[in-house]
Amino acid sequence: MSDSIAIDAKGLTKRFGSLTAVQDVNLQIPEAAIYGFLGPNGSGKSTTIRMLCGLLTPSAGEVQVLGFRVPGQAEEIKRHIGYMTQKFSLYEDLTVEENLRFLAAVYGLPRRDLKQRIDRALEEYWLTEQRKQFAGTMSGGQKQRLALAGATLHRPRLLILDEPTSAVDPQSRRDFWDILFALVEQGTTVLVSSHYMDEAERCHNLAILDRGRLVAEGRPRDLIRDINAGVVEIETATPRAARDCLEATDGVQSVAQLGTRLHALTDKAVEDPAGLIRRALKQADIDSEVESVTANLEDVFVAATRLNRHGGSAAHA
């Protein structure tokens, strides 16, 4: 991962009439790294990404992308960016090769090395056997690789992926991420939004957005280490009763059921999270085994978004 900055955003804000979709977001995204946006629908992920690549004009704030200003130099930025949307956006009635040739023309790539570049893309993205296949007849994973081949055909310095793996199987998602890490090794900066916690954990750095605000930012392992909550697991034969009890207990932020186990978050100020849980369940005459455990990224997400919705500020690691 490089020390150079690919994207520098200060006070990034976007309003649509009376709706503020993104509010006062500050970002510094390093070159040659995978930077992830994690958040629910409506959190501002896509709006932020579209501002960063010059497709939307910010209502307020300053942004530099690859040394270019947004919105003043948006057209220059677009020449250095690859963009892949959630929905497959290529032509389904064209073959794989025809789609890549069309994109090469859009990018203005020189004709002299076009065949070599397309051949290489087909090989790199495991599409050589599908060269003459119509895109509309391909599987979800194949379409995904074709879209990525098209987005990187002009060798962009910055690759932006807006929820790219929402419609593919787990193996295709894993293969897709292997490709992303290979691109980063070649110097590409990757900005990706996702709903998936396992994908977020793969990112070098991560921003968690909620209701248009940046509520946590840092390396996934640092966010997990510095979570603003205690994390406790409860084993019990009566999980529903235990959950009802804990949700009514002061100092307990949230409770989630995982089979016969419960996973609870407590306020950071609670000195003995497991002790709080044990006492509450004992008073309710509920048998249980309770232990403090290491947080996961979902815990970080729940704690950060809950803090935001109760008037807290963003956490950084």
Image (spheres, helix red, strand yellow):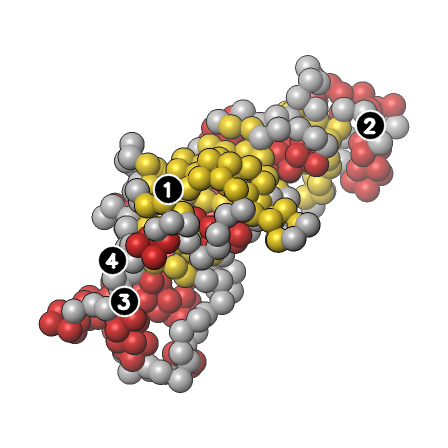
Look at the numbered discs 1 and 2 and tell me whether their residues touch, using CB distance below 8 Å: no
Q: CA distance from mark 3 to mark 1?
A: 22 Å
The secondary element bearing badge 1 is classed as: strand
Q: What residue is pinned by disc 3? A: 107
Q: What residue is pinned by disc 1? A: 64
Q: Is residue 144 left or right of residue 3?
A: right
Q: What residue is pinned by disc 2? A: 249
Residue extending farthest to the left is 112
Looking at the picture, does residue 144 appear above or below residue 16? below
Q: Is residue 122 left or right of residue 235?
A: left
The residue type indicated by label 2 comes to: Thr
Residue 155 quadrant: bottom left
Residue 272 quadrant: top right
The secondary element bearing badge 4 is classed as: loop
Q: Earlier in the sequence, mark 4 or mark 3?
A: 3
The secondary element bearing badge 2 is classed as: loop
Q: Nearer the viewer, mark 1 or mark 2?
A: 1
Residue in the image at 39% along x and 38% along y: 8
Q: CA distance from mark 4 to mark 1?
A: 20 Å
- Please tell me the numbered disc located at residue 155: 4
Residue in the image at 52% along x and 53% along y: 46
The residue type indicated by label 4 comes to: Arg
